[in-house]
Amino acid sequence: MEAFPVIDMEKLNGEERAPTMEKIKDACENWGFFELVNHGISHELMDTVERLTKEHYNKCMEQRFKEMVATKGLEAVQSEINDLDWESTFFLRHLPVSNISEIPDLEQDHRKAMKEFAEKLEKLAEQLLDLLCENVGLEKGYLKKAFYGSKGPTFGTKVSNYPPCPRPELIKGLRAHTDAGGIILLFQDNKVSGLQLLKDGEWIDVPPMKHSIVINIGDQLEVITNGKYKSVMHRVIAQPDGNRMSIASFYNPGSDAVMYPAPALVDKEEDQQKQVYPKFVFEDYMKLYAGLKFQAKEPRFEAMKAMESAANLGPIATI
């Protein structure tokens, strides 16, 4: 089995830029995932975010999770559970308007650290989007503009903990799905594993690595690149031991951004194949996704195609 792609971003600044860009391209085309090291976010900040997130879970979330498990009788399940996940989560919104100040139970230093971390991740996401533009043959800034809509991108963070599970063979930490949005940046536990992606019909572990950021491609990048880059199914396996931390930040299109394949990439197709992907407003896709998250993405694209014929959508929104 090929090694999971790990990208050293420092190599983009020297003689190894070309092979590093090729490695990113291969990861986007064939894995839908890659792991970044030397990404420019300080290890000290990451350590602070991890410490405060784990403290917050122990203090504010753990008891609630245990009560939920008890209420639903999950510890005594005898058959596979397919309608919920073994996870404890809360959500932070950064763009277009932050809600960090409104989240209950967060200590002030935790809010400050998460705000700083989000600002660094936002810059990293935009840097990555330009690298993807370069690799796929789009002008610099195209993906950022495509995501912009009228109010800028949507950017938020899902903070999750996956506690020890007594019956991991019967319940998933998080059921298999693709991500609806743009580009996802994950800071995951470096000791407790569980994240897996589907490649060539097999589930492959995404290796825990200290101070790395795991990147994955969302459905909208598949649409804009006309299928050159793929969003892939992934899941979290519940573990019998250890509490896995996951901080996933989603750099997504604005709610009113219009999504469609970049014309330059459709025109370049050798056989002038018909446009495979539909044109739609991102918010409409998210409404559909809410009910179909844990199903294949292809029927979602087909449903948006059906809506497209009834919609009169304008040109791409730009800054």
Image: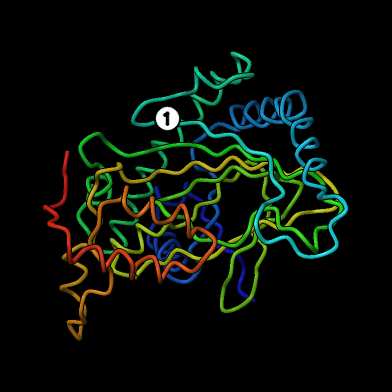
For this rendering, which residue is in front, 24 or 150?
150
User: Badge 1, how many Cα within 10 Å: few under 14, some, many 20+?
Assistant: many
Q: Is residue 70 placed above or below 36 in the rendered structure?
A: above
Q: Which residue is mark 1?
A: 94
Residue located farthest toward the top when viewing the structure as drawn = 108
Residue 277 image point, x, y percent: 28, 69
On screen, residue 174 versus residue 278, left or right, reads right
Residue, x 59% and y 62% (percent of image)?
176
Residue, x 50% and y 58% (percent of image)?
293
Q: What colouring does the structure picture have? A: rainbow
| Quadrant including the N terminus | bottom right
On screen, residue 190 versus residue 264, left or right, reads right
Residue, x 33% and y 30% (percent of image)?
96
Q: Is residue 59 placed above or below 232 in the rendered structure?
A: above
For this rendering, which residue is in front, 236 or 76?
76
For residue 220, which quarter of the picture? bottom left
For this rendering, which residue is in front, 139 or 109?
109
Residue 119 image point, x, y percent: 43, 29
